[in-house]
Image: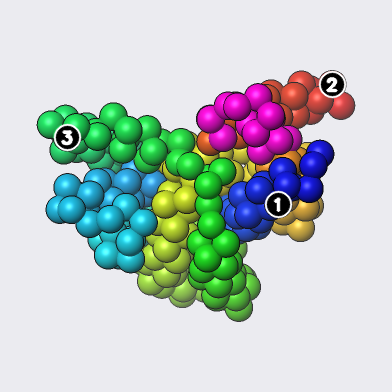
């Protein structure tokens, strides 16, 4: 591989590693909570916020668009935090998440229907344009995710307990609504930033697929993280390389590769 190609792919590769680092950890929480599509719903809400900003003439890459998108995402996070209950409900939270995703998707289509660049905007929201990420974006994302990672590391016992064993957290007098709000709010910051650079589908893949593969082969948090990070690393290397040399859409290429890795992992798990 030529040095010029390596230089071109270095920034996208670094952002992929950053996404892998935090999304695998958050994915373990999401899967343990049984709300697999909460990421997809929050990502779609973030995309809806960006769409609203776009219609008001704000630049797609501007700070104002980011904060509008973040406001929408935090509102969605508040809804999900207040609707969780460890006791059985007549309406499960997964249903609320699904309805939220459907409404957000339909709203984006309605808002962009009359726009001359509507189809291009929707495609950008879905698969992103990670191949053209800039170094300032990489550094800003790294800074934000580092702060959120430190926050989660400091309170890791509380976050893991409310995700893995909410009944025990309730018995210990933890405020589930408070910790859920802190979790979903920090999650919302991550999703808003990730969707901006990677798109809805790729963000969902980084969150769910490596974590699922990790849970297939390990019962410990450390083991799941190690496997998940390894899967994310491999997918990033081969996905970016294939996208560049075969001139394929990067986001879509990575998503399909994640699907292939999940399928192969399932086969391996069956035979061992």
Residue depicted at 69% across the width and 29% down the height? 245
Q: Is residue 78 visible?
A: no
Asked whether disc 2 touches disc 3, contact meaning CB atoms under 8 Å apart, the reply is no
Numbered disc 3: secondary structure: loop
**Which residues fall within the magenta stretch?**
238-250
> Dot 1: what SS?
helix
Going from N to C along the chain, the mark reached first, 2 or 3, is: 3
Q: Residue at x 63, y 54 (%)?
A: 11
Tell me the CA gap for discs 3 and 1: 36 Å
Helix, strand or loop under label 2: helix
Residue at label 3? 115
Check residue 265 for magenta coloring. no
Q: Quadrant of residue 182?
A: bottom left
Q: Which residue is nearer to you in this view: 164 or 115?
A: 115
Q: Residue at x 17, y 34 (%)?
A: 115
Pointer 1: what residue? 7
Q: How far is the residue under mark 2 from the one under mark 3?
A: 51 Å
Q: Which of the 4 quarters of the picture holds residue 232?
A: top right
- Say if 128 sits above or below 54 in the image: above
Q: CA distance from mark 1 to mark 2?
A: 40 Å
Q: Is residue 198 visible?
A: yes
């Amino acid at each position: 591989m030529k040095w010029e190609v390596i230089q071109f792919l270095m920034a996208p590769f670094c952002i992929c590693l950053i996404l892998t680092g935090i999304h695998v950890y958050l994915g373990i929480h999401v899967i343990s909570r049984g709300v697999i599509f909460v990421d997809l719903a929050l990502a779609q809400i973030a995309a809806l916020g960006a769409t609203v900003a776009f219609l008001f003439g704000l630049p797609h890459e501007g700070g104002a668009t980011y904060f509008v998108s973040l406001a929408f995402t935090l509102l969605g996070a508040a809804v999900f935090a207040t609707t969780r209950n460890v006791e059985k409900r007549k309406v499960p939270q997964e249903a609320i998440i699904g309805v939220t995703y459907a409404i957000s998707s339909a709203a984006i289509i309605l808002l962009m229907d009359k726009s001359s660049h509507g189809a291009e905007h929707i495609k950008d929201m879905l698969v992103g344009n990670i191949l053209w990420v800039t170094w300032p974006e990489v550094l800003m994302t790294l800074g934000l995710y580092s702060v959120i990672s430190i926050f989660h590391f400091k309170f890791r016992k509380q976050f893991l307990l409310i995700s893995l064993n909410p009944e025990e957290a309730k018995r210990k007098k933890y405020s589930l609504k408070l910790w859920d709000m802190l979790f979903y709010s920090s999650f919302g910051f991550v999703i808003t930033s990730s969707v901006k650079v990677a798109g809805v589908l790729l963000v969902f893949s980084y969150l769910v697929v490596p974590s699922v593969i990790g849970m297939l082969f390990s019962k410990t948090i450390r083991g799941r993280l190690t496997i998940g990070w390894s899967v994310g690393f491999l997918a990033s290397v081969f996905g970016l390389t294939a996208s560049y040399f075969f001139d394929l859409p990067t986001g879509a290429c990575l998503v399909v590769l994640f699907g292939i890795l999940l399928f192969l992992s399932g086969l391996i798990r069956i035979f061992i």
